[in-house]
Amino acid sequence: MIISIASGKGGTGKTTIATNLAVALAPEVKLLDCDVEEPNGHIFIQPRITHTEEVGLKVPQVDLSKCTLCGRCQEICQFKAIVVVGKSVLTFPELCHSCGGCIEVCPEDAVTEVDRAMGVFERGTRDGLQFAYGHLYVGQVMAVPLIERVRAEGESDTRTIIDAPPGTSCPVISSVKGTDFVILVTEPTPFGLNDLKLAVGMVKILNIPHGIVINRSDLGDDKVKEYAHQEGIPILMEIPFSRQIAEAYSRGKLLVEEVPDWKEKFMQLYERIVDYAGKS
Amino acid sequence: MQEKAEVKELIVISGKGGTGKTSVLGAFASLAENKVLCDADVDAADLYLILEPDIKERQDFQEGHKAVIDKDKCTECGICRELCRFHAISPEYEVDPIDCEGCGVCVYFCPADAIEFPLKTCGELFISDTRCGPMVHARLGIAEDNSGKLVTLTRQKAREQAKNKGLNLILTDGPPGLACPVIASITGADGVLIVTEPTLSGHHDMDRVVELARHFEIPASVCINKYDLNRNMTETIEAYARDEGLPIAGRIPFDPSFTAAMVQKQTIVEYDTSCSAAQAVRGIWEKLDSSL
């Protein structure tokens, strides 16, 4: 089973849930940190890295000795990433979506593809737990191809936990799509509720079973619970605010290892998800 | 030679989500004068929940295209499925609108001319009045892309508002992260305030946005929210900021009044102008205001 963890709003506790759930289930579990813009899972997991690779995006390169300046590449490109200027062809790799249109359309076979480095993918272990993540190079605009590289490590016959980035747009969709269950982490505040509703809209479009974890559950109001009841979405777990938890988090420590009873609570969370998702 | 624009824009960003960007920006909205407010977190916009805008103008945000196969014309030759690198076309020749990248390769090469390529509406933009001044905000459709372009458009509209109304400041609430929407929200700005928290994650994520601001040559300063949850980490982050030559705008204590204010749809300054968090935010604003 693949469980993904999303939230809409940032900073609600996705990484806390993902890392603690994974360590509670270790060693037979994979944890994939798909927040390649701001990955934090490795801070808590401290994996021993066994594999590192640079991830590139395919972008066009034009051989001007073959090019007849016909302009078809410019015409097909929806992203303005290839333009004929005077007697030359300019490419804008940061705008390219790697659709391959310019290569396919060129009648002279003058366009080929080269890799443009966008970030690094790493894989490692921690006491048998398998961990993978990516970090996007600073200044890179597109995160999705690197997310897809991390996401490709997930296998439905292995217990896999995916930590998604915040929001509800393309980077989140590529992390969550195709998973068996989504844990939506929220906090009981107006911002938390607003962004939870957006996240619920997203998982409904993707048609994935889902449940809610309420973090800092005693700071705020009851509107998140009222909403969950109205919508019939199960509340899987509540984590009250505690300085002990906040302090452990700030030092990169895991709840299941620092605070008594939490390992048991995360095991129960998993059992509940198995019941709702109908698979393990 | 063109004079430097009179309207200054300050963006609040963080890298890590949930550090308090919107609460801090909301407080600035209560403190600053002659400004336009801009919510550039179009993916999960929250500023409107505090400022309760009265919407005066709305417009559809149209950007990009999606492929749609006309079953009557389709001969099921398979060329589109072969060429689509995003695996967006099913064996039944249905295009998955979520997977479709809008590249148009299938449209171009379809021998039966069976694929339409309509412009899509992927969000809405609003120009509003609030009790703290004019506000430009937006909503990206759920599961839509092109957030960077909507961010750019939202900021353009905020600048138009400032010019039309003779206001000299734009306060922009930025999105979390490091890539497309964040880059779109900071390019060309006069300054960024990085709001972080005293955790290893907050530190790690801040380092990356500091590098991003430097990459785009935008002056950055740092403030630490909930600083008293880990004072050692606060000092570590401030030492890092000093080493990087970044001004430290201030520290804000952990204060449940932020949540209580949000529940009341108020900024922290409106909720309790004398509480320690409101005082801290006021100090930060005075520093930023004089440096802009």
Image: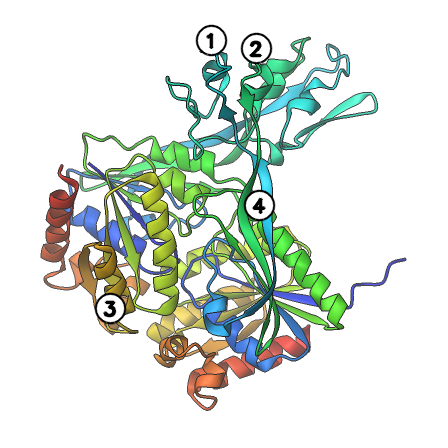
Q: Neighbour class for label 1 at 10 Å: few (<14), some, many (≥20)?
A: few
Indicate the position of residue B212 as horizontal and vertical percent values. Answer: 57, 52
The residue at the point 57 percent across, 21 percent down is: B107
Which badge, 2 or 1, comes first in the chain's sequence? 1
Q: How is the image coloured?
A: rainbow
| Three-letter code, disc 3 | Ser
Indicate the position of residue A214 as horizontal and vertical percent values. Answer: 25, 62
Output the chain of dot 4.
A
**Element under disc 2:** loop
Q: CA distance from mark 2 to mark 4?
A: 40 Å
Toward which corner of the image does residue A276 lie, by quadrant?
Answer: top left
Please identify, in this view, whether the residue under mark 3 or under mark 1 is nearer the observer. 1
Instruction: Name the residue beneath numbered marker 2.
Output: B111
Instruction: Name the residue beneath numbered marker 3.
Output: A217
Output the chain of dot 1.
B
Toward which corner of the image does residue A139 lie, by quadrant?
Answer: top right
Q: Is residue A15 left or right of residue B9?
A: left
| Pointer 3 and pointer 4 on the same chain | yes
Instruction: Name the residue beneath numbered marker 4.
Output: A139
Against B65, residue B143 (above or below) is below
Q: CA distance from mark 3 to mark 4?
A: 36 Å
| Three-letter code, disc 1 | Cys
Indicate the position of residue B151 as horizontal and vertical percent values. Answer: 59, 53
**The N terminus of chain A lies in quadrant:** top left
Output the chain of dot 3.
A
